[in-house]
Amino acid sequence: MLSEPLKKVLGPATAKVMAEALDLHTAGDLLHHYPRRYAERGELTALADLPLDEHVTVVAQVADARLHTYSGSRGRGQRLEVTITDGSGRLRLVFFGKGVHKPHKDLLPGTRAMFAGKVSLFNRQLQLAHPAYELLRGDGDAAVDTWAGALIPIYPATTKLESWKIAKAVDAVLPRVHDAVDPLPPALREGRGLTDLPDALHKIHRPRTKADITDARERLKWDEAFVLQVALARRRYADTQLPAVPREPVPGGLLDAFDARLPFTLTDGQRAVSKEIFADLATDHPMHRLLQGEVGSGKTMVALRAMLAVVDAGGQAALLAPTEVLAQQHHRSITEMMGDLAQGGMLGGAEHATKVVLLTGSMGASARRQALLDLVTGEAGVVVGTHALIEDKVRFHDLGLVVVDEQHRFGVEQRDALRGKGKQPPHLLVMTATPIPRTVAMTVFGDLETSVLDQLPAGRSPIATHVVPAQDKPHFLARAWERVREEVEGGHQAYVVCPRIGDDEDEPGDGGSAAKKAPSAEDAAEKRPPLAVTDVAGQLARGPLAGLRVEILHGRMHPDDKDAVMRRFAAGEVDVLVATTVIEVGVNVPNATAMVIMDADRFGVSQLHQLRGRVGRGSAPGLCLLVTEMPEAAPARQRLAAVAATLDGFELSRIDLEQRREGDVLGQAQSGARSSLRVLTVIEDEEVIAAARAEATAVVAADPDLEHLPELRTALDALLDAEREQYLEKG
C-alpha cells in the first residue's frame, strides 16, 4: 500500500532522514518526489553554470587526480585534488585527511561517476569539498543496476541524502505502484489520451526514453491541476449553497444621489464591472468576486458604488484595509467624494445620507465607543477600518457587504471572522491592484469570480520611468534631484521611497552567499545595508533639496503623526515626502508628479509598479526614477529595465512570475518544502489549468460530494488536510 510508512519499507534510519530532510513519510510521498532532471549516460552535466551555495548532483568524468602532502600545525597531512570535466567546464573536488584514501583509489582519470555536494568558492574557483560520489561502471556491474537505464534520474537531494540514495529508496517502493489510487475519472483520462497513474509513476522515475518522461509529465500535470481545481470548484459550489440577503439597488436612493453629483463620467470598464457586481448582489447566495484593476483604474469608485447600493437596500458595508494609513486615506477620500451624503443624522446632512465611520486600533476611547455604537444601531451605513473591525467587540446592525482591499495582505481567518459578523453570510468583494496573470487567478483565487478593470479613467496622465545607474553614472543621480526641484518649482510635489526606516532598526542580514564570493560591484551593492528614510531625508534636506519642505513617513510613527503628515502632503504643505512602502497602496495625491525610488533593485517588480502608480494621478504627467547601484549586467538591472519599459501591470506580473519561484507566487497555499505543485508550472501550463478547471467544474456540478468518484475523494483528502483547505481560501 502507498499509505504504508517509509520506516516499514526502508527501515527507521533512512525513513527518519527522509522525514526530516524532505518531509516524505509514506511510500506514496516518496513516489511523488519526482526527479528534478535526467542525466544521459553518454552526456555530461553542464559544470559551467553551477549555482553557488546550493547542493548539486553532477555526472562527470575524472580528468585528473593529484595527492598532495602538506605540513600544518598538527603535523603532516594529505589533500587529494580531483578535477572533473563534462566536456564544457571543469570543477575541482577536494578531500582532506583520512578521507583521501578511498577516493584516491576510486577516482582514477577516465572514471565516470555521480558527485553530490555543496558548491563553494575557493581562490575564485568553484569547488566541491568532500563530495559524496557513486561510480558509474559498465551496465553489467551489480553495484550499478540502479543506473542501467540510459537516463539517470537526478532527484532534489540534501546533504544527508544524496540523489542516488533516494533513487535506491524509490526502487524499493516502485513495485507497490500498482496500488496507486488514480484520482482522474476514467472518462476524463481516456478522453484526453492520458496514461494511467502506475504507468506514469514508472515512467517518471525509470524512463527508458525521453518520450517516457514527456508522457509521465503530461499525466502528472493533469493530476495536480485537476485535484486542485476540484478543491476550488467544491468551494465555489459550497458558497452557492449558502444563503444571503439579496441587496438590490433602490431607484432614487443614495447611489443615484451620489452618481448625480459625480464630476466625471464612469469609464466603460467601471460600468461593466459594476453591472457584474450588482447582478451578484441581487442573488440569494453570497457574491464572491475578485476585482483586479491596474493601479489607478478606479477600483475604489466601483467598490464605493457597490457599498452605497447595499446601504440603499437596508444593509451595511465594511471596507477592510491592510494599514492604518490606507484606512484613513480611504475614509478621507470616501467622505470627500460623498460630501453631505456622508453626514447622515447630522445637521446639513443630505436627504438620503448615511454615516461613514472609521475604526482603527489606535483611535481614542471615546471616538471608538461612538463608532461601535453607530455600527450596532445601523446609524453608520459604511465603515472603513483595519483589523480592528474583526475584534469580538465589533457588532453590526446588518452587515451586507465586505470589501477587502489588497487581499494578499489578509489571512483567511481574518476574512472569515469579518464574514461571520453578518446575520447571514455577507457578500464579498476582494480588490487587488497587483495584476494577476490569468493562470494564477485560476489557481490561487480559484474560488472567486474575477472582474478586471484595465482601462484608466480619462484625465490620467502617462508616467515616464527611467533607470538611474548611480554607481556607473553619478551625474544621473544629481540630475534626478534637479528634476525633483523642477517639479516642485512648477507647483508640484514628489515622493522619495527608501527600503528601510533607519535609526535603531535591526539591520537585515546580508545575503549569506554574497559574503563568500569574490567581491564585485554587484556584491558591494548587495552587501551595503539598504538606504533608510531617516538618513536620506536628512541628506536631501541639507544637500540637493535644501530649502524645500521635506518630511518623512514610515510605519513606526504614531498613527496620528502619520495621518498629520499625509494630510499636510495632500494639502500641498509638504514638497517632498521621504517614505517607506507605506505609500505603496491607495495613497492618492493628484498633485504629486515625481517619485524617486532609492535602491530600487531591492523591491519586486509588482511592488515597483504599485509605487509608481502613486504619481501621474492628476492632469500633469508623472515621472518615476529607479535609482540603483547594480551594474548593468546584473539580473536586478534587467528587472528594473522591464519596469521602465512598460506601464502594463499584467505584462509585468508575468515577468515577475517568470523571475520568481512558483512557490512565492502561490504564497502560503503552497508554502514549505512540499509544494503541492511538483510538475505543473503556473505560467507554462495555462492550457492544462484552464481545461482542468472546466472539467472540475463539470464533475462537481454533476456529483458535488464525489460519491461516484472515491479515488478522487481520496486524492483530495491527501491534498487538503484541513489546514491546506483553509489555505486555499488564500492566506
Image: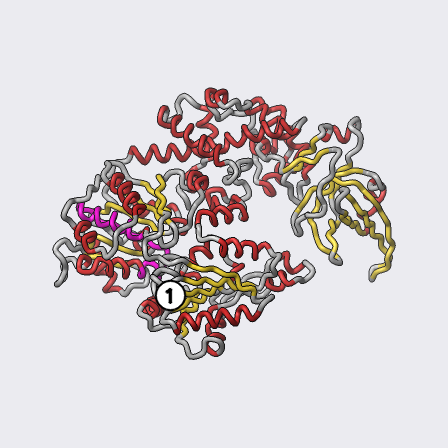
Pick the quarter of the image with the N terminus.
Answer: top right
Displayed quadrant of residue 722: top left
Establish if 169 lies above or below 20: above
Looking at the picture, tell me which residue is in the foreground, 319 or 277: 277
Per the image, is 301 magenta?
yes
Above or below — where is 530 with respect to 57? below
Which amino acid type is marked by label 1?
Ala
Location of residue 138 (image quadrant)? top right
Q: Picture coordinates of residue 392 (x, y %)?
A: 29, 52
Q: Is residue 147 left or right of residue 393?
A: right
Which residues are the magenta region? 300-329
Q: Which residue is mark 1?
A: 592
The main secondary structure of the magenta stretch is helix
| Residue located at (63% from left, 27% from top) | 211
- Front-most of 560 and 306? 306
Left or right of 75 in this view: 364 = left
Percent coordinates x, y for residue 435 in the rendering:
42, 48
| Place of residue 180 in the rendered image (x, y in percent of width and height, measured from the top left) | 54, 25
Q: Residues within 10 Å of mark 1 (few under 14, many from 20)?
A: many
